[in-house]
Image (tube, coloured by chain):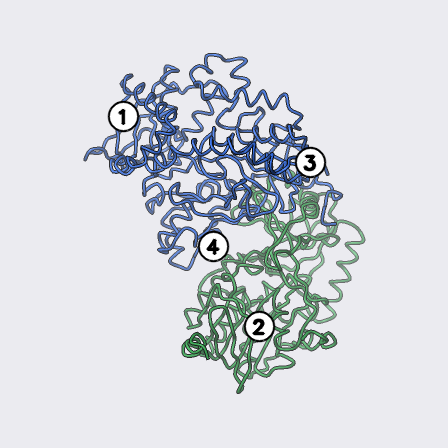
Amino acid sequence: MSATTRSARSTLATADVLVIGGGIHGCSVALHCALKGLSVIVVERHTVGRHASGVNAGGVRRLGRAVAEIPLSMAAMEIWHRITDLVDDDCGFRAAPQVKVAETEADLDTLAARAETVRAHGYDHEVPLDRQQLRSLLPAVAPHCIGGLASLGDGFADPYRTTAAFRRAAERHGARIVERCSALGIDRSAGRFRLNTDHGAFDGALLVNCAGAWGGEVAAWLDEPVPIEPIAPMMLVTDRLPRFCDAVVGAAGRPLSFKQMDNGTVVVGGGRRGVVDDQGTGTRLRLPELAKTAATAADIFPIMAGATIVRCWAGIEGRMPDDLPVIGPSGTTPDAVHAFGFSAHGFQLGPIVGAILAEQIVGDRGNLPLDAFDIRRFGSCKTDTA
Amino acid sequence: MDSADVAIIGAGPAGLAAAETLAAAGASVVLLDEQQMPGGQIYRGIEAVQALRRQTLSLLGSDYAAGATLAKALRNAPVDYQPGSMVWDVSRDLVIHYSREGRSQGLHARHLLIASGALERPVPIPGWTLPGVMTVGALQILLKSDGLVPRVPLVLAGSGPLLLLLAVQLLKAGAPPAAIVETVPRRAYRSAARHVPRALQGWRSLMKGRRWIRTLTHAGVPWYRGCTNLRVEGADRATGLAFHHAGRTETIAADVIGLHQGVVPNVQLTRLLDCEHVWDASQRCFRPRLDDWLATTVDGVSVAGDGGGIFGAVAAEWQGRLAGLNIAHRLDRLPSAERDRQAAPMRAALARERTVRPLLDTLYQPPPDVLRPADEVVVCRCEEVSAGRIREAVRLGCSGPNQAKSFLRCGMGPCQGRICGLPVAEIIAETRGVDLDDVGYYRIRPPLKPLPLMELAGLAADNDPAQ
């Protein structure tokens, strides 16, 4: 045995819980585990919040969630409204209506059907808006917009600040966060995990995969590969405009996510995608696609025709084929759990997913339905990937 | 989408020389430049000044007049010159997006030469954000493009050749500065002395400097040397400059304060392209890593001129020609033997031109309180972030300029970090006690300069190379 191996072994850091990934979910699970008295080590390849968690549009949204996600989203929303109690920082959270605008009669029909579906499942947070109600929420909306759908108790937050706040809260409660440390593989022996990284190995009783767009690699290490696709939703931000919008706005008929921040700048996104490159760690914009986002914003808010763009960017997200995340226990390995592949809508769920995983880790099943997020739904794709 | 063998960004000495070289080799060249006329900053407005304002030409001096030859060569060469073009994005597959006459368009090039020159180093001293404070470069632009000379009490403060040159030019224009407040410490003269023998090879530059100094001394312009603790006085606008000199605090009343601490490479484009950069400790700035032919670490992208390190206008011109020869070779328009043969005398001239730099870099090293300002000084002007808040963020775990963006919005305003990038990196490195190379720099995002939303909206979908 070489000297380096011996020294690595003698300095092997140990914790109850090893978390791969320092995004919003990794930091949230670290915090919730630490609150339960567990020792936690988080390894993060870059810096905390470097990717989707730090650069997303910051929407805190229940509106338009897949039905399976609604219970989680509702529970998360309760935490968001008192987020300071949890992390000792308001995370830049502002309560604001989330509104989806109908531009055509067909849009209006789509939104009406959606409202009916949500009501049928026993929820009443999504309310249809007529032309007049839409204008009372969005005075600056274009004349051709004829109605909408709103979730009034939603909001938005500052994504990087939020992730950093969860990180600091986790650290205050004893979690250790190791940045610029790449996970390279997992060994399992004697009922424990050995997480190998480019900065030595870590030993733990439990393993949590919060590796976001790269969560599929970790799942493959556990012999349960999943069909995850890295995507790069694009966003832009403008210079400061006079205050004209207090809601977070989407569109029924085309991709849009639109909000005016406290300082007057306007952040516009909505899911039009750039290109993931540099072996999956970098992004490239597709400007003609982003041009459509700009055009949509100006169509729905005519005031935007006078705006100036200060910055455009894209973040990397992991998208699952059914646009639902993977949350819950490993299908192959005891004591390993997953929370990744949030398909570009994981930010709002961060506070609750960490709580759910921490409960699972201490053996509490909790009462939120998670079946739809089980990794075993992709069982068929466990094929020739060694 | 339009396409070309070579796109050149910047019509200063490097860009003009490269365009001439490449056009002569038969390459199709598009030359994009923000200004309405060729010349860059150094030869700004040269054609207009030469044709219409002979008086301005004489006070700007013979070095400036040298730009006319380059401008004329451009007019005679088959180059697609597009003045008034603001490049706001370049992708690694060399699709360039630029705004011209209120419309944005794309251009695909096989090779890109970045010749976007230098920026003035920001001089964040107390009060530098007050109206009435300008950079020396901005004052010189007024002189070059409009023949304007401030007829109000004016102080020039800082260090560097441009500070003295502008003082001479103002003097000749009949508006001498009320004072020159120079921050070069006495010990810098001692440490610079050892570079003098080598610098003598570039004797013409040295003679020029001596001439300026004589002119200013002869005219009796008050000249304070070895000054420290500069501070702009005034509540709503600048009313004067206070500083320590020879053991006392002096204050000079002035309505305009011209600040200068030399120039640094404009790395916005090379950072946007993710070229590898290195920290240049003697020039206290980042510069792109370049090979012998001025190629960056990104295939097809070269840099000529001060954008690759500060060596001045004459060196920029030689670099433009060298880079042009190599690009022509890579386009199969010039055999390597011929390229090397033509390059040899250019390399020799370039080496001569560089001999004076160690002396200037040592002498005009910016003072520590400009590189790493005191806590109360605003560093990021767009978002009004002080040096103290950056240091506090570092103590909270902010490890580099990109985290500073997230912590403080520092560098996220309309200037895109052009102004605050270096001081932010210096402050973080100092507070963390690590090297600048470890701290790094802002990731630069498009648009490089603010872009009307409707220009982006107007980009046609059929321009998308990814489709």
Badge 3, how many Cα within 10 Å: few under 14, some, many 20+? some
At label 1, the amino acid type is Trp
Name the residue beneath numbered marker 1: B223
SS of the residue under disc 4: helix
Residue at the limit of the structure toward the bottom, as seen here: A190
Q: Report whether mark 2 lies on the same chain as mark 1.
A: no
Residues marked 3 and 1 touching at CB (< 8 Å): no
In primary-sequence order, the first of circles 3 and 1 is 3
Mark nearer the viewer, 2 or 3: 3
SS of the residue under disc 2: strand
Name the residue beneath numbered marker 3: B4
Badge 4, how many Cα within 10 Å: few under 14, some, many 20+? many
Name the residue beneath numbered marker 4: B403
Chain identifier, green in the render: A
Q: Relative to B361, does residue B402 appear above or below in the rendering?
A: below
Name the residue beneath numbered marker 2: A209
